[in-house]
């Protein structure tokens, strides 16, 4: 399966950001990508008041993503914000395209490193796995990467890969943690892990997470197969789905689990 990761830097204007999504989806489709994955907060960057711009999944921003997916024949996965009903928003991944219409609300909120996402964002409570051309792919968002149970749940649901969208906060050691965690989650769930971050905006760390770039694709054995630098860039990668079964036969960490011991 050929996928694309669009490492871009979004701003506070949803309309401008939607145009960026369109500008990046077209060359990805021309390169043969079946799935195009955009970062968390593609609709509007963190640091923007979220409640006033949040829209439902049948609102104009999501419909714009659907139009782009239809026009290019791809499945587009992009981060947006939807109303949560309590004055906060949900940090939502929309997945839409031929044969696919799904969403995932971020389960693990980034109350870490001096930032409190839960002040403005309500946590999700359900996993999401989509199917594209017979291949099942889990959805995850940013801080989720620190929680291996989610990625194992994707594998248990038949996923051969997880698509992770992030707006990874800068700071000492954060790039090293990002790279380590992406590789570890691929390895301990034995899935392909395609992780796309917001590009580094070049402004340094601030009050809200933005991005550091360094999007990557890790194989089910935990090795890095593709990686970007800090700047905006489009990464197109082929995932060998048969490799998942081969790795699971050699390294049977899923089959060898002892969940009864930890209950």
Image (cartoon, rainbow, N blue to C red):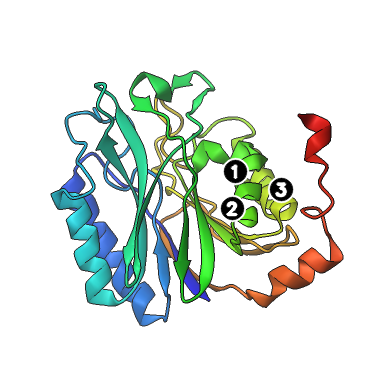
Q: Are marks 3 and 2 in contact (CB under 8 Å)?
A: no
Q: Position of residue 131 (x, y in %)?
A: 47, 66
- Pick whichever, 174 or 2, lies toward us: 2
12 vs 150, nearest the viewer: 150
- Which x, y percent locates residue 236? 49, 71
Residue placed at 20% from the left, 46% from the top? Answer: 14
- Establish if 97 lies above or below 109: below
Label 3 sits on a secondary structure element that is: helix
Left or right side of 3 for 258: right
* Of the image marks 3 and 1, the number of the one nearer the N terminus: 1
Please indicate whether residue 87 sits to the left or right of residue 226 in the image.
left
Q: Which mark is residue 93?
A: none
The C terminus: image quadrant: top right
Q: Are marks 1 and 2 in contact (CB under 8 Å)?
A: yes
Q: Residues within 10 Å of mark 2 (few under 14, many from 20)?
A: many
Q: Residue at x 77, y 72 (%)?
A: 246
Q: Which residue is mark 3?
A: 184
Residue holding disc 1: 150
Q: Quadrant of residue 119?
A: top left
Q: Position of residue 259 (x, y in %)?
A: 78, 39
Foreground: disc 3 or disc 1:
1
| Left or right, residue 60 beside residue 8 | left
Say which residue label 2 marks. 154
Corner quadrant of residue 208: top left
Q: CA distance from mark 3 to mark 1?
A: 13 Å
Give how far apart the Cα atoms at labels 3 and 2 are. Answer: 15 Å
Viewer-nearest of labels 3 and 2? 2
Q: CA distance from mark 1 to mark 2?
A: 6 Å
């Amino acid at each position: 399966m050929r996928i694309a990761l669009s490492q871009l830097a979004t701003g506070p204007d949803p309309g401008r950001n939607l145009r960026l999504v369109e500008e990046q989806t077209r060359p990805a489709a021309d390169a043969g990508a079946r799935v195009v994955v955009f970062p968390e907060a593609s609709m509007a960057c963190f640091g923007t008041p979220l409640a006033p711009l949040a829209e439902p999944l049948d609102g104009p921003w999501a419909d714009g993503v659907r139009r782009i997916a239809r026009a290019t024949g791809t499945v587009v996965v992009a981060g947006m914000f939807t109303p949560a009903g309590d004055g906060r928003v949900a940090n939502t991944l929309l997945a839409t395209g031929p044969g696919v219409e799904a969403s995932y609300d971020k389960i693990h909120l980034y109350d870490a490193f001096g930032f409190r996402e839960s002040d403005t964002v309500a946590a999700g409570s359900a996993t999401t796995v989509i199917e594209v051309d017979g291949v099942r792919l889990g959805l995850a968002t940013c801080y989720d990467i620190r929680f291996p149970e989610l990625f194992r749940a994707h594998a248990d649901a038949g996923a051969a890969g997880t698509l992770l969208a992030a707006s990874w906060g800068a700071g000492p050691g954060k790039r090293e943690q990002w790279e380590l965690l992406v590789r570890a989650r691929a390895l301990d769930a034995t899935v392909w892990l395609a992780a796309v971050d917001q590009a580094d905006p070049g402004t340094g760390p601030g009050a809200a997470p933005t991005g550091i770039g360094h999007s990557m694709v890790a194989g089910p054995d935990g090795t890095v197969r593709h990686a970007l630098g800090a700047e905006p860039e489009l990464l197109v990668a082929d995932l060998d789905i048969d490799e998942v079964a081969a790795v699971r036969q050699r390294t049977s960490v899923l089959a060898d689990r002892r969940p009864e011991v930890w209950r």
